[in-house]
Amino acid sequence: MPGLADKFSRLAALKPSRAMAARPATRSVPEPEDSLSLLLGAAVGTNYYGEHVCVSNWFSTPEFAEPSSATLELLCRTRDAAHSKRTHAALTDPTKWLFLDTETTGLSGGTGTYAFLIGIAWWDSGGLQVEQFLMRDFHEEHSILHELAGHLAERPVLVTFNGKAFDWPLLENRFAMTRAIATPRLAAHLDLLHPARALWKLRLGSVRLVELERHVLDAPKLGWNREEDVLSALIPQHYFDYLRGGPAAPVAGVVRHNQMDLRGLAAIMGRIDALLAASSRADQDLDSLDLFGLSRFLHKRGDSDRAHAACSQALDLGLPSQYRTQARRELAFLAKRRGDHAAAALLWHEVAAETAGNALDAIHACEQLALYYERRMKDLTRAIEFARQALAEVARLHGHSGDPYAFARLARKEQQLLNRVARLRHRMGLAIGARRPALPLLEPPPAPVKDKPSGVSG
């Protein structure tokens, strides 16, 4: 039964390979014909699975800075308290951190996408140690994955930039496809894209590492230069050209690009920590938009007190006009959650009086003031006044809205405000009736006396 035997042989091929005995990895000088390794000044690494190119460098910048406990708590906070404790315990030891960045044959992330260059870095001797594993052909993939697994076993806290969405899922897929190298288990994974987006997107628009280096890290001051950097979109083509016998110089440029990304990633981590620490004190070097972004990030992470302080500081430093109303609105919500209703009302008054503000903001501010005067101040007259002001803003928007969905939303809001005004008027009427003094009881009037008919004697 050759057909059945063939089927069983195919099934047997799907079984995971047996665990292989560990062998010490070695590094050797490249052969004269290995132009890429010679150009990079790299060694040839050898382990159980074969060879790969290994580039090793130590950089004095960025310098190591001990992260604050508040920064670690914010970055690793999750809804699962037990998981958060485990994560925080791993994060408190920076020697367990491993920065990672990959260069791949495409951006799709499917089974046909390879991470042909894996760059890792860690803090060492006050600076940054960078190791890069490059495969000169696809058969060297097992070798570089084996190297990465060994480093993650020593440093299980992964730090990436968009790594949760791209780099790590791709590597997990490549590990699974080897059927021989187990996927490393991470103690924690910090993706710095999300805090970077919250902190600097308002000011910069783009939060690509290159933009952050230029405008946040002050790359020229650090002595970093990307003038001859490789465009990210061309990286896969450079590698494919090399595999077809093309020049090694473009791939060497890709390796330098990866080095700069790793150094930038480590520096961004330090800058996030510095910004979080500086938000607790008056620091004139901070940008108001950065502080406003920080306040939103802190608020989202549940740190309301520091979010309030950062937002207040941003307003004091002078936010651009298009963000002032938004900052006041968020500051009012924070004050309300803190129970400081008088401070919240003062901010809502400022929002309502902002003539250049958004009409929707004015409507919301007037609604909040109507609630404040009704429930806190027991001033129904002022409550009706602000409800009517909100109605006037709704009517103004009605005349400028051509969107049928917006028109329907405004109609619902108008009806809600009309109901509020009617309810407040009814309450005022009841209150007036309750305060009106009762009339005294009067004696019943005497019954009228009927006239006697004429001609009748008494």
Image (cartoon, helix red, strand yellow):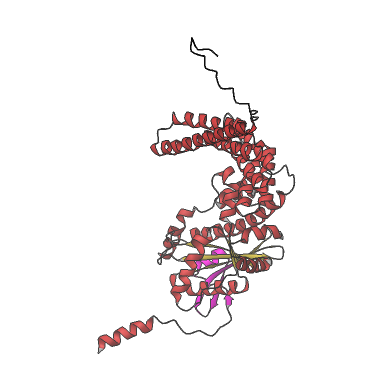
Residue 409, by quadrant, is top left
What are the residue bounds of the magenta stretch? Answer: 26-55
Point out the image quarter for the C terminus. top right
Give left or right: position of 148 versus 288.
Answer: left
Point out the image quarter for the N terminus. bottom left
Extreme bottom residue here?
1
Q: Position of residue 221 (x, y in %)?
A: 67, 48
Residue 66, by quadrant, is bottom right
How many callouts does the rendering have?
A: 0
- Whether residue 44 is in magenta: the answer is yes
Residue at 70 percent of width and 60 percent of height: 69
Residue at 63 percent of width and 67 percent of height: 87
Extreme top residue here?
455
Q: Nearer the viewer, residue 71 or 439?
A: 439
Residue at 67 percent of width and 36 percent of height: 346
Q: Position of residue 367 (x, y in %)?
A: 56, 37
Extreme right residue here?
281
Q: Nearer the viewer, residue 302 or 133?
A: 302
- Whether residue 207 is in magenta: the answer is no
Placement of 31 over or under 197, stated as above or below: below
Placement of 403 over or under 96, stated as above or below: above
Placement of 22 over or under 161, stated as above or below: below
Q: Position of residue 313 (x, y in %)?
A: 69, 42
Residue 221 in sight from this viewpoint: no
Give left or right: position of 86 versus 110.
Answer: right
Q: Position of residue 310 (x, y in %)?
A: 68, 46
Residue 123 in sight from this viewpoint: yes
Extreme front residue here?
457
Residue 405, by quadrant, is top left
